[in-house]
Amino acid sequence: MSKNEQPIIVGLDIGTTKVVAIAGRKNEYGKVEILGFGRADSAGVSHGVVMNIEQCIRSIEQAMERCLVSNPNLELKEVYVGIAGQHIKSLQTRGDRVRANSEIEINQEDIDMLIRDQNKTYIPAGDQIIDIVPQDFTVDNTPDVLDPIGMSGVKIGANFHIITGDRNAIRNIKRCVDKSSLTTRDLVLQPLASAAAVMNDEDLEAGVAIVDIGGGTTDMAVFYDGILKHTAVIPYAGVNITNDIRNGLGVLRAQAEQMKVQFGTALADEANSNAYITIPGLRGLPPKEISVKNLAHIVQARMQEILDYVMYHLKQIGLEKRLCGGIILTGGGAQLKHITQLTEFVTGMGARIGYPNEHLAGGYTESLMNPMYSTCIGLILRGYHDFENGKMRFANQGGNMIHLSMDEQVAVMNEPLTVQQEVELDEPVAETTPEEMAEMNQQRARKRNDNVKKLFDGLKGKFMKLFEDVEDQEIQ
Protein backbone atom coordinates (compact mmCIF):
# COMPACT_ATOMS: atom_id res chain seq x y z
CA MET A 1 0.00 0.00 0.00
CA SER A 2 1.44 3.39 -0.91
CA LYS A 3 1.94 6.05 1.71
CA ASN A 4 -0.82 8.20 0.24
CA GLU A 5 -3.35 5.42 0.90
CA GLN A 6 -2.36 5.06 4.54
CA PRO A 7 -4.58 6.93 7.02
CA ILE A 8 -3.28 9.31 9.65
CA ILE A 9 -3.82 7.86 13.12
CA VAL A 10 -3.85 10.08 16.21
CA GLY A 11 -2.96 8.72 19.66
CA LEU A 12 -4.11 10.69 22.70
CA ASP A 13 -2.50 9.87 26.04
CA ILE A 14 -4.40 11.55 28.90
CA GLY A 15 -2.11 11.20 31.90
CA THR A 16 -1.92 12.59 35.42
CA THR A 17 0.99 14.91 34.63
CA LYS A 18 0.78 15.40 30.86
CA VAL A 19 -1.54 15.10 27.87
CA VAL A 20 0.20 14.06 24.64
CA ALA A 21 -1.24 13.97 21.13
CA ILE A 22 0.80 12.36 18.33
CA ALA A 23 -0.32 12.00 14.72
CA GLY A 24 1.45 9.35 12.66
CA ARG A 25 1.30 7.49 9.38
CA LYS A 26 3.06 4.31 8.30
CA ASN A 27 5.62 4.48 5.52
CA GLU A 28 6.35 1.83 2.89
CA TYR A 29 8.60 -0.02 5.35
CA GLY A 30 5.89 -0.35 7.98
CA LYS A 31 7.42 2.22 10.35
CA VAL A 32 5.49 5.13 11.84
CA GLU A 33 6.39 8.59 10.57
CA ILE A 34 5.41 11.36 12.96
CA LEU A 35 3.31 14.07 11.29
CA GLY A 36 2.31 16.11 14.33
CA PHE A 37 3.14 16.33 18.01
CA GLY A 38 1.61 18.29 20.89
CA ARG A 39 2.07 18.14 24.62
CA ALA A 40 0.40 20.01 27.49
CA ASP A 41 0.44 19.87 31.26
CA SER A 42 -2.43 17.76 32.55
CA ALA A 43 -5.03 19.17 34.91
CA GLY A 44 -8.10 17.57 36.39
CA VAL A 45 -6.72 14.00 36.35
CA SER A 46 -5.53 12.14 39.44
CA HIS A 47 -4.04 8.63 39.28
CA GLY A 48 -5.53 8.12 35.84
CA VAL A 49 -9.07 9.11 36.89
CA VAL A 50 -10.78 12.32 35.71
CA MET A 51 -11.55 14.49 38.73
CA ASN A 52 -12.44 17.74 36.93
CA ILE A 53 -14.07 17.55 33.51
CA GLU A 54 -13.48 21.18 32.49
CA GLN A 55 -9.79 21.21 33.41
CA CYS A 56 -9.23 17.93 31.57
CA ILE A 57 -10.97 19.29 28.45
CA ARG A 58 -8.71 22.36 28.46
CA SER A 59 -5.60 20.18 28.70
CA ILE A 60 -6.78 18.01 25.77
CA GLU A 61 -7.58 21.08 23.66
CA GLN A 62 -4.18 22.60 24.42
CA ALA A 63 -2.33 19.42 23.40
CA MET A 64 -4.35 19.15 20.17
CA GLU A 65 -3.75 22.84 19.35
CA ARG A 66 0.00 22.37 19.76
CA CYS A 67 -0.16 19.31 17.56
CA LEU A 68 -1.78 21.46 14.86
CA VAL A 69 0.80 24.22 15.37
CA SER A 70 3.55 21.67 14.66
CA ASN A 71 1.82 20.80 11.35
CA PRO A 72 -0.96 23.16 10.14
CA ASN A 73 -1.82 20.76 7.27
CA LEU A 74 -3.34 18.23 9.65
CA GLU A 75 -7.06 17.74 10.22
CA LEU A 76 -7.42 16.09 13.63
CA LYS A 77 -10.92 14.83 14.35
CA GLU A 78 -10.59 11.19 15.47
CA VAL A 79 -8.31 9.80 18.17
CA TYR A 80 -7.35 6.58 19.91
CA VAL A 81 -7.36 7.17 23.66
CA GLY A 82 -5.39 5.36 26.34
CA ILE A 83 -7.25 4.17 29.43
CA ALA A 84 -5.68 3.38 32.81
CA GLY A 85 -6.38 4.27 36.43
CA GLN A 86 -6.46 2.50 39.75
CA HIS A 87 -10.00 1.27 39.00
CA ILE A 88 -8.66 -1.14 36.34
CA LYS A 89 -8.59 -4.72 37.64
CA SER A 90 -8.08 -8.17 36.17
CA LEU A 91 -9.04 -11.74 37.02
CA GLN A 92 -8.51 -15.25 35.66
CA THR A 93 -11.42 -17.49 34.69
CA ARG A 94 -11.93 -20.85 33.04
CA GLY A 95 -14.63 -21.59 30.48
CA ASP A 96 -15.74 -24.81 28.75
CA ARG A 97 -18.36 -25.54 26.15
CA VAL A 98 -19.74 -28.85 24.85
CA ARG A 99 -20.29 -28.69 21.10
CA ALA A 100 -23.62 -29.80 19.61
CA ASN A 101 -22.02 -31.52 16.61
CA SER A 102 -18.54 -32.91 17.22
CA GLU A 103 -18.23 -34.12 13.61
CA ILE A 104 -17.86 -30.55 12.34
CA GLU A 105 -14.48 -28.84 12.62
CA ILE A 106 -14.05 -26.21 15.31
CA ASN A 107 -14.57 -22.78 13.74
CA GLN A 108 -14.41 -19.12 14.78
CA GLU A 109 -18.05 -19.16 15.84
CA ASP A 110 -17.28 -21.79 18.51
CA ILE A 111 -14.54 -19.59 19.93
CA ASP A 112 -16.75 -16.47 19.81
CA MET A 113 -19.50 -18.31 21.72
CA LEU A 114 -16.96 -19.46 24.33
CA ILE A 115 -15.75 -15.88 24.76
CA ARG A 116 -19.32 -14.55 24.99
CA ASP A 117 -20.01 -17.01 27.82
CA GLN A 118 -17.38 -15.18 29.91
CA ASN A 119 -19.56 -12.07 29.96
CA LYS A 120 -21.59 -13.90 32.61
CA THR A 121 -18.60 -13.84 34.97
CA TYR A 122 -19.44 -12.17 38.27
CA ILE A 123 -17.84 -8.76 38.73
CA PRO A 124 -18.54 -6.08 41.39
CA ALA A 125 -21.47 -3.72 40.87
CA GLY A 126 -20.54 -0.60 38.92
CA ASP A 127 -17.68 -2.34 37.09
CA GLN A 128 -17.74 -3.28 33.44
CA ILE A 129 -15.85 -5.98 31.56
CA ILE A 130 -13.41 -4.16 29.27
CA ASP A 131 -11.62 -7.01 27.53
CA ILE A 132 -11.72 -10.81 27.52
CA VAL A 133 -8.39 -12.27 26.43
CA PRO A 134 -8.23 -16.04 25.70
CA GLN A 135 -4.85 -17.41 26.77
CA ASP A 136 -4.69 -21.10 25.88
CA PHE A 137 -7.32 -23.58 24.75
CA THR A 138 -8.08 -27.23 25.43
CA VAL A 139 -9.82 -29.56 23.00
CA ASP A 140 -11.14 -32.66 24.80
CA ASN A 141 -8.04 -33.96 26.61
CA THR A 142 -5.49 -31.99 24.56
CA PRO A 143 -4.12 -29.06 26.63
CA ASP A 144 -2.18 -25.92 25.64
CA VAL A 145 -3.74 -25.53 22.19
CA LEU A 146 -2.92 -22.07 20.82
CA ASP A 147 -5.33 -22.14 17.85
CA PRO A 148 -8.08 -24.79 17.92
CA ILE A 149 -9.70 -23.75 14.61
CA GLY A 150 -9.83 -26.71 12.24
CA MET A 151 -9.52 -29.35 14.98
CA SER A 152 -12.19 -31.90 15.92
CA GLY A 153 -13.51 -32.43 19.41
CA VAL A 154 -16.54 -32.70 21.67
CA LYS A 155 -15.53 -30.14 24.29
CA ILE A 156 -13.61 -26.91 23.83
CA GLY A 157 -12.34 -24.85 26.77
CA ALA A 158 -9.94 -22.02 27.52
CA ASN A 159 -8.33 -20.01 30.28
CA PHE A 160 -9.29 -16.34 30.09
CA HIS A 161 -7.79 -13.10 31.35
CA ILE A 162 -10.66 -10.71 32.03
CA ILE A 163 -9.99 -6.97 32.47
CA THR A 164 -12.57 -4.80 34.23
CA GLY A 165 -12.91 -1.11 35.01
CA ASP A 166 -15.28 1.35 36.62
CA ARG A 167 -17.95 2.23 34.07
CA ASN A 168 -18.36 5.85 35.15
CA ALA A 169 -14.60 6.50 35.20
CA ILE A 170 -14.34 5.30 31.59
CA ARG A 171 -17.39 7.32 30.55
CA ASN A 172 -15.82 10.46 32.03
CA ILE A 173 -12.69 10.06 29.91
CA LYS A 174 -14.78 9.57 26.77
CA ARG A 175 -16.93 12.58 27.75
CA CYS A 176 -13.83 14.80 28.01
CA VAL A 177 -12.71 13.76 24.52
CA ASP A 178 -16.19 14.28 23.06
CA LYS A 179 -16.45 17.78 24.56
CA SER A 180 -13.07 18.63 23.02
CA SER A 181 -14.74 18.31 19.58
CA LEU A 182 -13.03 14.98 18.93
CA THR A 183 -14.37 11.52 18.13
CA THR A 184 -13.04 8.57 20.12
CA ARG A 185 -12.16 5.77 17.70
CA ASP A 186 -11.47 3.38 20.56
CA LEU A 187 -10.27 3.23 24.14
CA VAL A 188 -7.15 1.09 24.60
CA LEU A 189 -5.59 -0.18 27.81
CA GLN A 190 -2.41 1.81 28.36
CA PRO A 191 -0.21 -1.13 29.45
CA LEU A 192 -1.11 -2.99 26.24
CA ALA A 193 -0.45 0.11 24.11
CA SER A 194 2.95 0.63 25.77
CA ALA A 195 3.79 -3.06 25.30
CA ALA A 196 3.05 -2.85 21.57
CA ALA A 197 5.42 0.11 21.23
CA VAL A 198 8.45 -1.26 23.12
CA MET A 199 8.25 -5.03 22.64
CA ASN A 200 9.53 -7.16 19.76
CA ASP A 201 8.84 -10.79 18.85
CA GLU A 202 11.88 -12.03 20.81
CA ASP A 203 10.50 -10.39 23.97
CA LEU A 204 7.10 -11.95 23.36
CA GLU A 205 8.66 -15.40 23.05
CA ALA A 206 11.12 -15.09 25.96
CA GLY A 207 8.60 -13.70 28.41
CA VAL A 208 8.72 -10.13 29.77
CA ALA A 209 7.01 -7.82 32.21
CA ILE A 210 6.28 -4.37 30.77
CA VAL A 211 6.31 -1.81 33.61
CA ASP A 212 5.09 1.63 32.49
CA ILE A 213 5.91 4.11 35.27
CA GLY A 214 3.72 7.11 34.54
CA GLY A 215 2.77 10.19 36.50
CA GLY A 216 -0.21 8.85 38.47
CA THR A 217 -0.11 5.07 37.98
CA THR A 218 2.34 2.31 37.14
CA ASP A 219 0.82 0.06 34.48
CA MET A 220 1.96 -3.53 34.14
CA ALA A 221 1.51 -6.19 31.46
CA VAL A 222 3.12 -9.66 31.68
CA PHE A 223 3.69 -11.88 28.64
CA TYR A 224 4.84 -15.51 28.71
CA ASP A 225 4.94 -18.08 25.89
CA GLY A 226 3.62 -15.42 23.54
CA ILE A 227 0.46 -14.97 25.65
CA LEU A 228 -0.77 -12.06 27.77
CA LYS A 229 -0.74 -13.60 31.24
CA HIS A 230 -1.51 -10.67 33.53
CA THR A 231 -2.29 -6.96 33.66
CA ALA A 232 -2.28 -4.68 36.67
CA VAL A 233 -2.44 -0.98 37.56
CA ILE A 234 -0.36 0.00 40.59
CA PRO A 235 -1.65 3.28 42.12
CA TYR A 236 1.84 4.65 42.83
CA ALA A 237 4.07 6.46 40.34
CA GLY A 238 5.92 9.72 39.68
CA VAL A 239 3.44 11.98 41.49
CA ASN A 240 3.92 9.96 44.68
CA ILE A 241 7.69 10.42 44.49
CA THR A 242 7.19 14.18 44.04
CA ASN A 243 4.82 14.31 47.04
CA ASP A 244 7.28 12.34 49.18
CA ILE A 245 10.03 14.85 48.34
CA ARG A 246 7.71 17.76 49.03
CA ASN A 247 6.63 16.46 52.43
CA GLY A 248 9.97 14.99 53.45
CA LEU A 249 12.09 18.01 52.61
CA GLY A 250 9.53 20.77 53.18
CA VAL A 251 9.62 22.32 49.70
CA LEU A 252 7.05 23.45 47.14
CA ARG A 253 5.60 20.95 44.70
CA ALA A 254 7.29 22.60 41.69
CA GLN A 255 10.63 22.55 43.51
CA ALA A 256 10.15 18.89 44.43
CA GLU A 257 9.42 17.97 40.79
CA GLN A 258 12.45 19.89 39.55
CA MET A 259 14.73 18.24 42.11
CA LYS A 260 13.41 14.78 41.20
CA VAL A 261 14.06 15.32 37.49
CA GLN A 262 17.44 17.05 37.76
CA PHE A 263 19.06 15.46 40.82
CA GLY A 264 16.96 12.41 41.71
CA THR A 265 18.45 8.93 41.57
CA ALA A 266 16.87 5.57 42.35
CA LEU A 267 20.00 4.32 44.16
CA ALA A 268 21.02 6.25 47.25
CA ASP A 269 24.46 4.57 47.26
CA GLU A 270 25.21 6.28 43.94
CA ALA A 271 24.38 9.77 45.25
CA ASN A 272 27.17 12.18 46.18
CA SER A 273 27.09 12.59 49.95
CA ASN A 274 28.93 15.92 49.70
CA ALA A 275 26.52 17.50 47.18
CA TYR A 276 23.80 19.91 48.29
CA ILE A 277 20.93 21.67 46.53
CA THR A 278 20.17 25.28 47.49
CA ILE A 279 16.45 26.14 47.54
CA PRO A 280 15.50 29.87 47.69
CA GLY A 281 13.78 30.90 50.92
CA LEU A 282 10.10 31.89 50.90
CA ARG A 283 9.22 35.54 51.54
CA GLY A 284 12.51 36.61 53.05
CA LEU A 285 13.37 33.34 54.81
CA PRO A 286 16.96 32.13 54.45
CA PRO A 287 17.77 29.66 51.65
CA LYS A 288 17.49 25.95 52.43
CA GLU A 289 20.33 23.49 51.89
CA ILE A 290 19.15 19.99 50.88
CA SER A 291 21.44 16.97 50.72
CA VAL A 292 21.40 15.07 47.42
CA LYS A 293 21.89 11.91 49.49
CA ASN A 294 18.68 12.55 51.47
CA LEU A 295 16.82 13.22 48.23
CA ALA A 296 18.04 9.89 46.82
CA HIS A 297 16.89 7.98 49.95
CA ILE A 298 13.36 9.39 49.50
CA VAL A 299 13.25 8.52 45.79
CA GLN A 300 14.64 5.02 46.35
CA ALA A 301 12.14 4.23 49.11
CA ARG A 302 9.12 4.96 46.88
CA MET A 303 10.62 3.29 43.79
CA GLN A 304 11.40 0.20 45.83
CA GLU A 305 7.76 0.09 46.99
CA ILE A 306 6.57 0.23 43.35
CA LEU A 307 8.95 -2.60 42.39
CA ASP A 308 7.78 -4.62 45.40
CA TYR A 309 4.25 -4.38 43.95
CA VAL A 310 5.61 -5.57 40.59
CA MET A 311 7.15 -8.60 42.29
CA TYR A 312 3.92 -9.23 44.21
CA HIS A 313 1.98 -9.46 40.93
CA LEU A 314 4.60 -11.71 39.35
CA LYS A 315 4.49 -14.06 42.35
CA GLN A 316 0.69 -14.15 42.14
CA ILE A 317 0.98 -15.79 38.72
CA GLY A 318 4.13 -17.80 39.48
CA LEU A 319 6.37 -16.09 36.94
CA GLU A 320 8.84 -14.28 39.22
CA LYS A 321 11.67 -16.60 38.12
CA ARG A 322 10.55 -17.62 34.64
CA LEU A 323 10.71 -14.43 32.57
CA CYS A 324 13.83 -14.85 30.43
CA GLY A 325 13.30 -11.41 28.89
CA GLY A 326 13.26 -9.76 32.32
CA ILE A 327 11.57 -6.42 32.92
CA ILE A 328 11.13 -3.63 30.37
CA LEU A 329 10.75 -0.24 32.04
CA THR A 330 9.01 2.51 30.11
CA GLY A 331 7.01 5.66 30.77
CA GLY A 332 8.32 8.97 32.10
CA GLY A 333 9.46 7.40 35.38
CA ALA A 334 11.85 5.14 33.49
CA GLN A 335 14.10 8.16 32.91
CA LEU A 336 15.09 8.22 36.59
CA LYS A 337 18.83 7.69 37.04
CA HIS A 338 19.93 4.16 38.05
CA ILE A 339 16.37 2.82 37.73
CA THR A 340 17.52 -0.33 35.91
CA GLN A 341 20.10 -1.13 38.61
CA LEU A 342 17.49 -0.79 41.38
CA THR A 343 15.04 -2.94 39.39
CA GLU A 344 17.61 -5.70 38.95
CA PHE A 345 18.49 -5.53 42.64
CA VAL A 346 14.87 -5.74 43.87
CA THR A 347 13.57 -8.30 41.35
CA GLY A 348 16.65 -10.40 40.65
CA MET A 349 15.85 -10.19 36.92
CA GLY A 350 17.45 -8.35 34.04
CA ALA A 351 16.01 -4.92 33.25
CA ARG A 352 16.23 -2.42 30.42
CA ILE A 353 14.57 0.79 29.33
CA GLY A 354 11.91 0.34 26.65
CA TYR A 355 11.98 2.95 23.87
CA PRO A 356 9.46 3.07 20.99
CA ASN A 357 12.37 2.85 18.50
CA GLU A 358 11.20 -0.47 17.08
CA HIS A 359 8.27 1.06 15.20
CA LEU A 360 9.41 4.65 14.59
CA ALA A 361 11.09 5.88 11.43
CA GLY A 362 14.49 7.30 12.36
CA GLY A 363 16.25 10.61 11.93
CA TYR A 364 13.78 13.43 12.43
CA THR A 365 11.91 11.82 15.36
CA GLU A 366 14.91 11.50 17.70
CA SER A 367 13.35 13.64 20.43
CA LEU A 368 10.22 11.45 20.39
CA MET A 369 12.23 8.27 20.95
CA ASN A 370 11.57 8.73 24.62
CA PRO A 371 9.96 6.21 27.00
CA MET A 372 7.31 8.73 28.08
CA TYR A 373 5.76 8.56 24.59
CA SER A 374 5.49 4.76 24.41
CA THR A 375 1.75 4.73 25.13
CA CYS A 376 0.99 7.27 22.39
CA ILE A 377 3.02 5.37 19.79
CA GLY A 378 1.27 2.16 20.87
CA LEU A 379 -2.13 3.81 20.35
CA ILE A 380 -1.15 4.64 16.76
CA LEU A 381 -0.12 1.00 16.26
CA ARG A 382 -3.50 -0.15 17.58
CA GLY A 383 -5.20 2.13 15.07
CA TYR A 384 -3.22 0.57 12.23
CA HIS A 385 -4.02 -2.90 13.52
CA ASP A 386 -7.72 -2.09 13.24
CA PHE A 387 -7.26 -0.50 9.81
CA GLU A 388 -5.22 -3.37 8.37
CA ASN A 389 -7.73 -5.92 9.66
CA GLY A 390 -10.58 -4.09 7.99
CA LYS A 391 -12.28 -3.15 11.27
CA MET A 392 -12.43 0.56 10.46
CA ARG A 393 -12.57 2.99 7.59
CA PHE A 394 -10.53 6.16 7.88
CA ALA A 395 -10.79 9.47 6.10
CA ASN A 396 -7.45 10.15 4.40
CA GLN A 397 -6.54 13.44 6.09
CA GLY A 398 -3.90 15.72 4.70
CA GLY A 399 -0.53 15.94 6.37
CA ASN A 400 3.10 16.37 5.52
CA MET A 401 6.14 15.02 7.31
CA ILE A 402 7.45 17.26 10.08
CA HIS A 403 11.13 17.68 10.76
CA LEU A 404 11.07 19.53 14.07
CA SER A 405 14.35 20.69 15.51
CA MET A 406 14.70 20.82 19.28
CA ASP A 407 14.27 24.61 19.27
CA GLU A 408 11.07 24.32 17.28
CA GLN A 409 9.67 21.73 19.67
CA VAL A 410 10.49 23.93 22.65
CA ALA A 411 8.63 26.77 20.96
CA VAL A 412 5.61 24.53 20.41
CA MET A 413 5.52 23.03 23.90
CA ASN A 414 7.15 25.78 25.96
CA GLU A 415 9.28 23.15 27.68
CA PRO A 416 12.39 21.22 26.65
CA LEU A 417 12.51 17.56 25.79
CA THR A 418 15.40 15.31 26.73
CA VAL A 419 16.77 12.80 24.27
CA GLN A 420 17.47 9.68 26.30
CA GLN A 421 18.90 7.48 23.57
CA GLU A 422 20.28 7.96 20.11
CA VAL A 423 18.49 6.45 17.15
CA GLU A 424 19.33 2.81 16.59
CA LEU A 425 19.79 2.34 12.87
CA ASP A 426 19.58 -1.02 11.15
CA GLU A 427 23.05 -2.43 10.49
CA PRO A 428 24.05 -2.08 6.83
CA VAL A 429 24.35 -5.27 4.84
CA ALA A 430 27.49 -5.54 2.71
CA GLU A 431 27.12 -5.92 -1.05
CA THR A 432 23.35 -5.79 -1.09
CA THR A 433 21.49 -4.66 -4.19
CA PRO A 434 18.71 -2.06 -3.84
CA GLU A 435 16.14 -4.74 -4.75
CA GLU A 436 17.42 -7.09 -2.01
CA MET A 437 17.48 -4.24 0.52
CA ALA A 438 13.87 -3.31 -0.32
CA GLU A 439 12.80 -6.94 0.13
CA MET A 440 14.60 -7.14 3.49
CA ASN A 441 12.88 -3.95 4.66
CA GLN A 442 9.52 -5.36 3.62
CA GLN A 443 10.23 -8.55 5.60
CA ARG A 444 11.14 -6.51 8.67
CA ALA A 445 7.92 -4.53 8.30
CA ARG A 446 5.86 -7.73 8.06
CA LYS A 447 7.62 -9.12 11.14
CA ARG A 448 6.87 -5.99 13.15
CA ASN A 449 3.24 -6.00 12.02
CA ASP A 450 2.89 -9.69 12.93
CA ASN A 451 4.15 -8.95 16.44
CA VAL A 452 1.61 -6.14 16.96
CA LYS A 453 -1.10 -8.36 15.45
CA LYS A 454 -0.31 -11.12 17.97
CA LEU A 455 -0.68 -8.64 20.80
CA PHE A 456 -3.95 -7.05 19.73
CA ASP A 457 -5.72 -9.99 18.05
CA GLY A 458 -6.57 -11.65 21.34
CA LEU A 459 -8.54 -8.65 22.50
CA LYS A 460 -12.27 -8.56 22.19
CA GLY A 461 -12.22 -5.41 20.07
CA LYS A 462 -13.96 -2.09 20.38
CA PHE A 463 -15.12 -2.29 23.98
CA MET A 464 -16.03 1.40 23.77
CA LYS A 465 -19.29 0.26 22.17
CA LEU A 466 -20.28 -1.35 25.47
CA PHE A 467 -20.50 2.05 27.11
CA GLU A 468 -22.18 3.72 24.15
CA ASP A 469 -24.89 1.02 24.06
CA VAL A 470 -25.64 1.46 27.76
CA GLU A 471 -25.91 5.25 27.37
CA ASP A 472 -28.24 4.88 24.38
CA GLN A 473 -30.52 2.56 26.34
CA GLU A 474 -30.69 5.00 29.24
CA ILE A 475 -31.59 7.88 26.91
CA GLN A 476 -34.38 5.85 25.33
Image: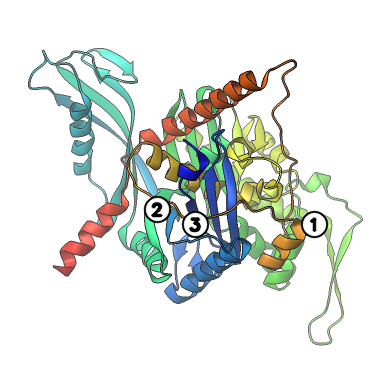
Crowding near the residue tagged with mark 1, few <14, some 14–19, many ≥20 C-alpha atoms within 10 Å? some
- State which mark lies toward you, 2 or 1: 2
Q: Amino acid at mark 1?
A: Phe
Crowding near the residue tagged with mark 2, few <14, some 14–19, many ≥20 C-alpha atoms within 10 Å? few
* Colour style of the rendered protein structure: rainbow
Residue highlighted by disc 1: 263
Compared with residue 336, is residue 208 higher up or lower down, i.e. above or below?
Answer: above
49 left or right of 24 in image = left
Q: Nearer the viewer, residue 174 or 450?
A: 450
Q: Position of residue 344 (x, y in %)?
A: 67, 34
260 left or right of 214 in image = right
Q: Nearer the viewer, residue 48 or 378?
A: 378
Compared with residue 465, is residue 230 higher up or lower down, i.e. above or below?
Answer: above
448 left or right of 120 in image = right
- State which mark lies toward you, 3 or 2: 2
Q: Quadrant of residue 114?
A: top left
How much space separates mark 1 and mark 3, taking CA atoms? 30 Å
Q: Position of residue 65 (x, y in %)?
A: 55, 68
Dot 2 lies on which element? loop
Residue 395: mark in rendering: 2
Q: Position of residue 385 (x, y in %)?
A: 42, 39
Query: What residue is drawn where x is 48% and y is 61%?
Result: 75
Q: Position of residue 84 (x, y in %)?
A: 45, 53
The tag earlier along the polypeptide, 2 or 1, is 1
- State which mark lies toward you, 1 or 3: 3
Query: What residue is drawn where x is 58% and y is 56%?
Result: 36
How much space separates mark 2 and mark 1, taking CA atoms? 46 Å
Query: What residue is drawn where x is 46% and y is 35%?
Result: 1
Residue 405: mark in rendering: none
Q: Amino acid at mark 2?
A: Ala
Residue highlighted by disc 3: 12
